[in-house]
Amino acid sequence: MEVTARAARRGDTPALAAASVDTSSKIAVDRRQLLGGLAAVPLAASIPAGRAAAARPAAAPIIDVVLAPGLTVLVQDAGETGVAAFESADGRRTVASDFERIRTAYLPASTFKIPHTLIALETGVVASLDEPLFKWDGTVRTLDGKPIDAWNRDQTLREAFRNSTIWVYQEVARKVGPERMTRLVTALDYGNRAVGEIDSFWLSGPLRISALEQIAFLGRLRAGALPVSARAQALTREAMVIETENTHVLSGKTGWAFDQKIGWFVGWIEANGASRLFALNLDVAGQKSLAARTALVKSAAHQLRVL
């Protein structure tokens, strides 16, 4: 039996996979005036110099959003429509390429594998990232008519996270069950906290999250400040590591919301003694947009002097 990626629900391809607050009531300045003042400011001038991660409070609240014109140009020059957002060097602001879109909520798609992994570990549905081994049911899952080898085999949760294997996380969700899932998504204060159909609510259901909310959630995970065990948070951070180089460590998760045609990349970059959260989402017109995600995040990191 063959199941298309759409029929198997939405996520992200392995080849391309590599609570916040609405702060409007908490900011004393008029952001519209702020935009005008920043429009002519070079990117480097609008971002404080890098600061060692140890100097930043572990879970400092992100209390403001500042437009970074250089990021706006970066996204536009790439021929993409979306938002690129980074935590500021002091950990108390978010700098973004689009002042409105950073607050627009979308389906999280495979970026939900981050809280989903936390929940799997916290509930004991999985013992660790490497146990148990999830047994493939023999159903061939495809994307655009082509079988995805990484999906069509037995695998651990660690591998399923890396490969964006939808069926593994759907099995996890069914084992967690609606009651525990609702309780933990609410406790994690993830997006709008809406849990619907247990094995698809993050793919085509009611769950929504904005780039700003992604950054706030990830900030609490990075700090180990979520209301789940330290072990679950540490193992999830371990699963998120994508790239380890001499110059940096890149951690995160991509996602592709088919129904909304939105591509995500969220996480953090550790470099030069500092750690900076980021969230990017783009309108997906084709494979070019999906392939652009990692390159855009790295280009933004260079502009912000993170790398």
Image: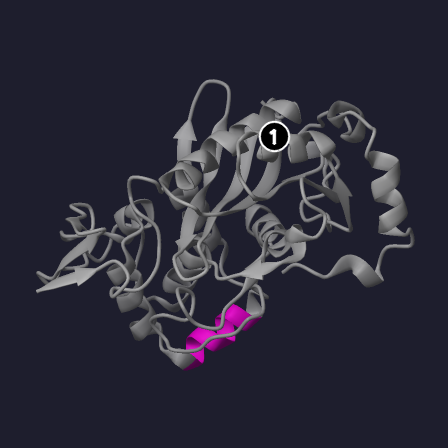
Identify the image quadrant of the C terminus: top right
In the image, what residue type sits under mark 1? Leu
Please indicate whether residue 295 sits to the left or right of residue 274 in the image: left
Question: Is residue 53 something one can see in this rendering?
Answer: no
Q: Rate crowding at label 1 as few (under 14), some (14 to 19) or many (20 or more) other CA atoms within 10 Å.
A: some
Viewer-nearest residue: 124 or 158: 158
> What range of the chain is rendered magenta?
179-186
| Pointer 1 residue | 74
* Residue 58, picture quadrant: top right
Viewer-nearest residue: 116 or 167: 167
Secondary structure under tag 1 reads: helix
Which residue is rendered at x = 70% and y = 61% of the image? Answer: 21
Which residue is rendered at x = 74% and y = 27% of the image? Answer: 43
Question: Is residue 279 something one can see in this rendering?
Answer: yes
Which residue is rendered at x = 77% and y = 42% of the image? Answer: 66
Which residue is rendered at x = 53% and y = 39% of the image? Answer: 80
Q: Is residue 298 above or below residue 206?
A: above
**Residue 215, position in %: x, y?**
61, 49
- How would you classify the magenta stretch by its main secondary structure? helix
**Residue 192, position in %: x, y?**
58, 69
Q: Is residue 75 above or below residue 107?
A: above
**Residue 51, position in %: x, y?**
72, 28
Viewer-nearest residue: 166 or 283: 283
Is residue 277 inside the magenta stretch? no
Please indicate whether residue 92 sits to the left or right of residue 301 in the image: right
